[in-house]
C-alpha cells in the first residue's frame, strides 16, 4: 500500500512539474513584445525626424505631417502650424505610453507568470515591480489603457474637423467604457482583497 501511494505521489509530482515547466512557453510571446517595442522605437524616430524636417521646410516631411493631421494627401497649403505640431507631439506621447504599457506587460508578466528576475536591491528596479502580482498588473494595465485612450481622444477633438460625428461619438463611448471597466476592475480587486483579509483574520 505504501509503495502504491509513493508511486501515485511520484506520478502526480511529474505531471505537476511538467505543467509548471509549461510556463516557459510564454517566453517567445514576451520576446515578440520586445520586438514590437523595437518597432515602436523606430516609428517614434521616423515621426520625430519628419516633424523636424517639416519645421525646417522639407517638402516630403511637410506632406507627411499634413497627411497625419488632415488625413489627406497634402495637396492644400503646405505649411506647418501650431495645431499640426501639437498633434504630432501628442502622437509621439501616444507611442511612449504604448511603449510603457509594453514594458509593464513584458517585465510584470514575466515576473508574475514565468520566473523571478531577482532584481531586489538593483538601483534600476522599477518601484512597482517590488509588489507586482496579477491583480496589481491588471489595474496598472487598465490605467495605462485609459491614458492611451485619453491621448487618442484629445488628438481627435483637437482635429475634430477631420472626423465625422459618428467617429467622435464612438471614440468618446469607447473611452467611457475603458473608464467604467477600470473602475470595475479596481472595485472587484478591492472586494477580493477585503475578503482575503477577513478570512485571514478569522482563521487567526
Image: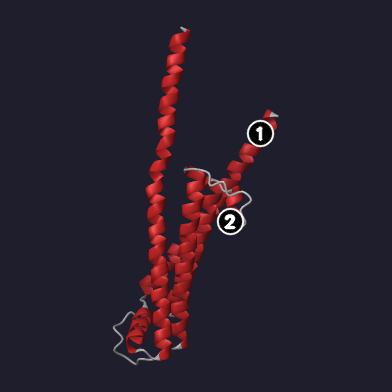
* Residue 11, above or below 190: above
Q: Nearer the viewer, residue 165 or 93?
A: 93
Indicate left or right for 68 with 112 as reference.
left
The answer for how far apart the CA atoms under marks 2 and 1 are is 29 Å
Quarter of the image where the C terminus is located: top right
Residue sitting farthest toward the top: 1
Q: Nearer the viewer, residue 13 or 98?
A: 13
Packing grade of label 1 (10 A; few <14, some 14-19, many >=20) is: few
User: x, y percentage for residue 34?
Assistant: 41, 57
Label 2, secondary structure: give it. loop
Packing grade of label 2 (10 A; few <14, some 14-19, many >=20) is: few
Label 1, secondary structure: give it. helix
User: x, y percentage for residue 124?
Assistant: 59, 58
In percent of the image, x 45 and y 83: which residue is there?
A: 85
Q: Nearer the viewer, residue 95 or 180?
A: 95
User: x, y percentage for residue 110?
Assistant: 48, 48
Residue sitting farthest toward the front: 122
The quadrant in which residue 24 appears is top left
- The type of colouring in the image is secondary structure
In percent of the image, x 57 and y 48: which residue is there?
A: 132
In percent of the image, x 35 and y 84: which residue is there?
A: 61
Q: Which residue is mark 1?
A: 200
**How many numbered discs?**
2
Indicate left or right for 115 with 54 as reference.
right
- For marks 2 and 1, give the one nearer the viewer: 2
Q: Which badge, 2 or 1, is on the more N-terminal residue?
A: 2
What label sits on residue 135 in the rendered view? none
* Residue 139, above or below 158: above
User: x, y percentage for residue 63?
Assistant: 33, 85
In percent of the image, x 48 and y 81: which residue is there?
A: 86
Q: Which residue is mark 2?
A: 126
Amino acid at each position: 500500500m505504501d509503495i502504491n501511494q509513493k508511486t501515485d505521489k511520484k506520478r502526480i509530482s511529474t505531471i505537476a512539474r511538467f505543467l509548471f515547466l509549461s510556463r516557459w512557453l510564454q517566453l517567445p510571446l514576451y520576446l515578440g513584445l520586445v520586438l514590437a517595442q523595437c518597432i515602436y522605437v523606430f516609428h517614434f524616430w521616423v515621426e520625430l525626424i519628419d516633424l523636424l524636417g517639416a519645421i525646417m521646410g522639407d517638402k516630403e516631411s511637410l506632406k507627411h505631417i499634413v497627411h497625419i493631421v488632415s488625413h489627406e494627401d497634402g495637396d492644400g497649403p503646405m505649411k506647418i502650424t501650431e495645431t499640426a505640431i501639437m498633434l504630432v507631439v501628442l502622437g509621439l506621447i501616444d507611442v511612449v505610453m504604448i511603449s510603457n504599457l509594453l514594458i509593464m506587460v513584458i517585465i510584470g508578466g514575466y515576473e508574475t507568470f514565468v520566473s523571478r528576475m531577482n532584481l531586489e536591491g538593483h538601483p534600476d528596479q522599477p518601484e512597482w515591480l517590488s509588489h507586482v502580482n496579477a491583480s496589481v498588473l491588471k489595474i496598472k494595465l487598465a490605467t495605462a489603457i485609459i491614458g492611451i485612450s485619453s491621448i487618442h481622444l484629445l488628438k481627435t477633438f483637437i482635429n475634430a474637423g477631420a472626423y465625422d460625428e459618428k467617429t467622435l461619438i464612438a471614440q468618446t463611448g469607447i473611452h467611457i467604457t475603458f473608464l467604467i471597466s477600470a473602475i470595475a476592475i479596481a472595485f472587484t480587486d478591492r472586494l477580493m482583497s477585503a475578503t482575503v483579509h477577513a478570512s485571514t483574520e478569522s482563521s487567526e
